Amino acid sequence: MLVIAGLGNPGSEYAHHRHNVGFMAADAIARRHSFSPWSKKFNALVCEGRLGGDKVLLVKPQTFMNLSGQAVGEALRFYKLGIEDLIVLYDELDLAPGKVRVKTGGGAGGHNGIRSLDAHCGKDYRRVRIGIGHPGNKELVTRHVLGDFAKADAVWLEPLLDAIADAAPMLVDGDGSGFMNKVSLAVKPYLSEAEKAGEKADARPKAKSHIHQARPKEPKVKIPESGPMADMLRKLFGKE
């Protein structure tokens, strides 16, 4: 048996946040592979099903992100599973939107959910990092992570979640490279569309500032080289 934990925050107000993409991926897997209905257990929502030949428990901690490890650790202990039986799906700032990477172990990278899992479960579990992109400014990170996906993100987000669900049996079988390749190929056309749309938006003529439009142009006056008029005009137009 394996445990696949999707990370996020409980509650409808958080449902569409970038930070909740782990929950979204877990939901997509449950739908795609006809898992049992979600029920409450281990301070989490859980459902059971099969991926390939393996029995899988999907877990969505309801303890809020910072305490995710409590719920996941409780599930592992109940089923007497080891850290090698855990796969975690979560958002990654340092990956471009729509990119997915799989690795075993590593640091928390500032992710509080991963920090909690490391503390309660150990570090050597498989991690599926789902790119949400970085806003480019450290001061904007919290608003970015705890903000809804933009409407334009649906172009690549929905195909990405479908691809993760379709390729999930490969992940369970230990074929992380095959999983990443299949997801990448499935999402690539949609990422290209999103990139093209962004390029078109960047190429649009920028509207002139109303301040710039209202600024009067310097009068085109030919200043005599010498004489009283030349002195007066130089003072008037700031010519030295």
Image: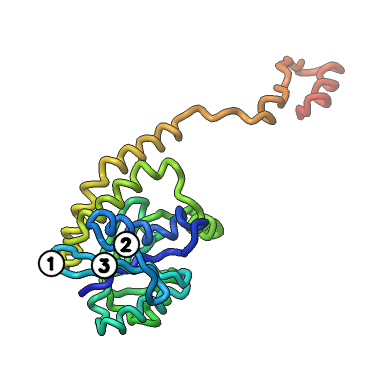
Q: Tell which circle, 2 or 3, labels the residue nearer the N-terminal end.
A: 2
For the residue carrying disc 3, how many other residues have a C-alpha within 10 Å: few (<14), some (14-19), or many (20+)? some
Residue pointed to by mark 3: 48
**Image mark for residue 236:** none
Q: Relative to residue 152, is residue 178 drawn left or right?
A: left
In this rendered view, identify the residue nearer to me: 19 or 2: 2
Q: CA distance from mark 2 to mark 3?
A: 8 Å
In this rendered view, identify the residue nearer to me: 23 or 110: 23
**Image mark for residue 53:** 1
Residue 215 in sight here: yes
As displayed, is residue 185 above or below residue 34?
Answer: above
Task: Find numbered disc 3 in the image and state the secondary structure of the residue it sits on.
Answer: strand
In this rendered view, identify the residue nearer to me: 177 or 228: 177
Q: CA distance from mark 3 to mark 1?
A: 13 Å
Residue pointed to by mark 2: 37
* Circle 2: residue type: Pro
* Circle 3: residue type: Glu
